[in-house]
Amino acid sequence: MSNTRHIYTNATLIDSVRPTPIPNTSVVVENGRITQILEGGAKADTANAVVTDVAGAYLMPGLWDVHIHPDYLQLADVPLADQVTLFGHKLIAALTDSGIVGLRCAGAHHYMDVAWKRAFDTGQYVGPHLYAAGHFLTTTGGHFLTSGHALECDGPYGFVHAIREQMKNGVDHIKLNLSGGIMGPAWDLHTHSFLLDEEIKAAFAICHQREFKVMAHATNPQAVKAAIKLGAHSIEHGYILDDECIDLFLEHGTWYVPTLAITHLTPNQAQTDFERRWVKNRNLMQSLCCRADAAADVHAHWFEKALKAGVKMAVGSDIRPLKEAALLEIGLWAKDGATPWQTLLATTKHGAEVCGAGKDLGTIEVGKIADMIVVAGNPLEDINNVQRLQLVIKNGDIITDKRAPA
């Protein structure tokens, strides 16, 4: 945590508390936390401070992506040490290149997410806040086994044993894959649920007993309802919902992380230059593009319905590279009917809250950690202005400065 006193002056503040920009604001940071927010041109005491004039640009909380994975690389092709190193470089690039200050992992083999979480938390490297899942757990013949991140479990005790192993190795939450997905072989379908009742009940029971949150991959109404009723902290994907799912989300206060990128980013659907470039580089198999295209309209429908109903929602991308993933997902929220304010909350305040960090992060308020970004355009007019990055501020210190030289 920085000991330097910083003052960011002449900012147009977007604090993720009020849905309007506050011009001519100064934010004072001491020991890495915000100590004063001075509006209306009020002047801060500049003695013994580093003063940065942001020249009217938009000062806002850093971004969050609450569904990520390392690259899907096989050990036969890339040694483990190289994969771990590559993951760390990409985590750091997400912070420094795009202002993504918080990331929640949804599966990583060999606990590489735990290793990097510890490296960042102890100050060995400057990186984002990272929340680790270890492996994601599925059944034999379950979801996305070729990723390398899956751990196959069978029977109630098989899941209990695997969950205890994750806990022992330092994860923050447990990722359960209750159903299939879009990206998989013909038998891995998002319309199918994989766990038996006794398996899912045992898995949730041990998580509750040990006070670990469950991040539930659930892609159809059966899986979504089972997960919410058993106390899932968040539902990931939710490609297909129904009205009862929406009611259960609201009744239980469960988070929904829709990962629109999985169904929406195909050659047939890409609309912007950013999306088309990404889709070209991804080069997804035609058969998987067809599965995504077929699922996209239903996914978009239930996303919009959940949003309008007031379901708690946060931005998670489930794609790579990490420095582009959240930015692409944010654009898709806007395309599917979310307002800039709804999207901004989902990738700042709500991202921190999903990770249990809302007390310290996610908004610009006195007492909170000063993880902030400055962007050149107003994201409340066009949410894609978050791509117009000028400064990344970590614990009050500027770690990226993209402003043109004076």
Image (cartoon, rainbow, N blue to C red):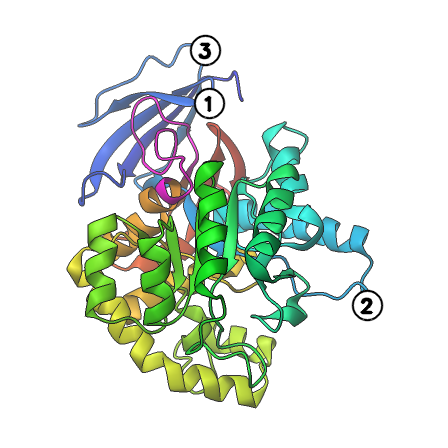
Left or right for 389, reference 80 = left
Q: Is residue 20 magenta?
A: no
Q: Quadrant of the N terminus?
A: top right
Give yes or no for contact between labels 2 and 3 (Cβ–Cβ under 8 Å).
no
Q: Earlier in the sequence, mark 1 or mark 2?
A: 1
Q: Within the image, what quadrant is residue 19 found in?
A: top left
Residue 77, numbered label: 2
Q: Within the image, what quadrant is residue 16 found in?
A: top left
Q: In this rendering, is residue 400 above or below 98?
A: above
> Is residue 83 at least partly visible in the picture?
yes
* Residue at the disc numbered 3: 48
Cα–Cα gap, marks 2 and 3: 53 Å
Question: Mark 3 or 1, which is nearer the eye?
Answer: 1
Left or right for 250, reference 27 = left
Question: Mark 1 or 2, which is nearer the eye?
Answer: 2
Image position, residue 173 (x, y; %): 50, 44
Q: Is residue 361 magenta?
A: yes
Give yes or no for contact between labels 1 and 2 (Cβ–Cβ under 8 Å).
no
Query: Is disc 2 surrounded by few (<14), some (14 to 19) or many (20+) residues within 10 Å?
Result: few
Left or right for 16, reference 357 = left
SS assignment for the magenta stretch, majority: loop
Image position, residue 398 (x, y; %): 51, 33
Q: Secondary structure at mark 3?
A: loop
Q: In this rendering, is residue 260 above or below 161?
A: below
Cα–Cα gap, marks 3 and 1: 15 Å
Q: Amino acid at mark 3?
A: Asn
* Residue at the disc numbered 1: 32
Total marks placed: 3
Q: Which residues are magenta?
A: 353-372
Q: Residue at x 53, y 56 (%)?
A: 68
Q: Amino acid at mark 1?
A: Gly
Q: Earlier in the sequence, mark 2 or mark 3?
A: 3
